[in-house]
Image: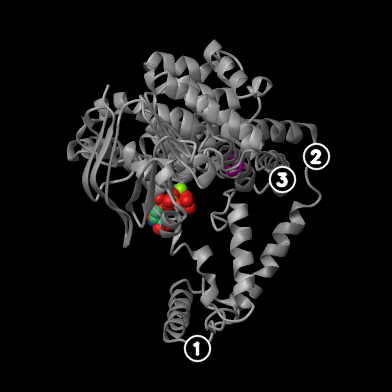
Amino acid sequence: MQGISLENVSVGFGGVKALSGATLGVEAGEQLAVIGASGAGKSTLFRALNRSVALGGGRVAVGGHDLYALPRRRLNELRRRIGTIYQAYNLVPQLPAGVNVSLGEVGGMGGLGTLRTFLAGPGAGLSKKVGAALEEVGLGGKAGVRTADLSGGQQQRVAVARLLVQRPDFILADEPFAAVDPVTTERVLQTLLHLNREGATLLVNLHDVEIARRFPRIVALREGSVAFDGPPERLTEDALAEIYAGDSSATADEEAFDLSELRRGLERSMRLTEGRDGVSSH
Amino acid sequence: MASPRTERPGIGGAIPRFSWKGSLAVLVVLGLTGYSVTGTNFNIVELIRGTGAAERFVSEMFPPDLSAATLRATGTGILETFQMSFLGALLGAVVAFPLSALGTQQISTVGASRGERLRRAVPYHLSRTLLNVFRSVPDILWALVFVVALGLGPFPGTLALAVHSAGVLGKLYSETLEAVPSRPVEALAATGASGFQTFLFGRLPQAMSGFTSLTLYQWECNIRSATILGFVGAGGIGQQILISMNLFDYPKVATLVGATIIVVLIVDRFSAAIRQRLAY
Ligand SMILES: Nc1ncnc2c1ncn2[C@@H]1O[C@H](COP(=O)(O)OP(=O)(O)OP(=O)(O)O)[C@@H](O)[C@H]1O
Ligand SMILES: [Mg+2]
């Protein structure tokens, strides 16, 4: 099995360059933490790895396939092997948690299987796999609960369970620890590492540098390109300062008066409501 | 974020200040008003002069005819109207659903080839056009068409309501489907789900409560329309109202119209209550 490679990848949204000339190679089975300031392009990088954004330039290869050159059918086959956990979960809120979990394997179903799953309705027809996955993330009794009625952290765990059902060869986890407590963080991390030990290539976006340091390889993005790539030992305080320089939360001090203080507080609280933890402390 | 001391003009002030665009708009509205008043012979004096005849008409309606025969006829007419409107909405929904599914723009065309885009565009435009034809012809015209083709009675009326409802619902359904939050749908597509699968598990569940509410509302509209369709011979209580009018049986007209108003109010209330519950 082959890994992932990005060659000089650029992605733009209107005038904004989210990725510009990002180059990165990841071996199959590797585990990798991606860090970077807010807006550095981490989520966009992941979206380029399952062809959810249009490419401005460059080349993306996953598992030896040129991702953006594949015809629809082949693309879907490859996408089945790529599992993603999103920053905003992106579950279907009206469906029961169990159905959302079983959607992890919907890509592999034929037309008839799809209809059967659809008509079986909530609760019924959930495979053993789904039950086991929910059990594993500690949501054994929640299969029938409407996903919108779950807490943020619980929804995140539903997304992890969906990943377990999908059993992908490549895992893209976009801030999977943003809304979960420390115990759950550890649990989700162990689950992801377990999948990695079984052969899956693991890429995790992190705001928490301490957790990132537990990965054998760290890649830092800054303004859309790779600014650091190496083992955690090489990630010095200076390197970190460089990576997070220009992050708006770190440069509020040029502002006049106590207004800057107010602004910093505002930004901090905004960041909290978005369910991410701040990087200004690092 | 703006720097602290920046003034922000343009924020605040609910009453718009003078602007050329605004003045032009006012002029256009005034012009159109005058044009339409002359075109329609709109005349307040004539309206007031006509009140005498209207008064006579209304006073002749009272007391309403509450004889057993009239009540029975009213009941039959009301029931027929009810049945027509219900079946019309149901058939309309059944036809609208697949057409709206085809008439929904796919979001994920990232990296789609030109042939692929074209293949998606054909069913989209076909179903949109069909729905537009269904919708833009008013139900009373559809009723005329079906009465000519099938003869008098509630059946052509029901078909007329069904076709018009299909047009209205189809458009509203596909708009609902398109307005659904796209991230869950994209997430499904990113796991390799097909277009059909993302529709079934991503779009549809998110649009479902909207569908139900729209269908109920269309049923309300159909009840009101169904009372009129009788005027062109397409069944329902309207047919009885027309006959009684032609016979100058105003007390019976009063009973029929009164009953219609009551039923319309009841259905409105009922459906509004259900729609309220659906909108959480
Ligand atoms: N759909 C979009 N439309 C327009 N601009 C976008 C879109 N998605 C991302 N961007 C822009 O691209 C840049 C990179 O965004 P991205 O989401 O990749 O950042 P990130 O590193 O994941 O940040 P965070 O840590 O806050 O999640 C940002 O400037 C953002 O505003
Ligand atoms: Mg992000």
First-in-chain label (2 vs 3): 2
Q: Which residues are magenta?
A: B217-223
Residue B232 drawn at (x, y percent): 49, 42
Residue B156 visible in the current orientation: no
**Crowdedness near tag 2: few (<14), some (14–19) or many (≥20) residues, C-alpha within 10 Å:** some
Q: Quadrant of the C terminus of chain B?
A: top right
- Asked which secondary structure carries label 1, the reply is loop
Q: Indicate the amino acid at tag 2.
A: Leu
Q: Is residue B222 magenta?
A: yes
Residue A265 drawn at (x, y percent): 64, 65
**Residue at 49% of width from left, 22% of height from top?**
A194
- Give the labeled residue for mark 2: B66
**Residue at 29% of width from left, 41% of height from top?**
B109
Q: Indicate the amino acid at tag 3.
A: Leu
Q: Indicate the amino acid at tag 1.
A: Phe
Which mark is on residue B267? none
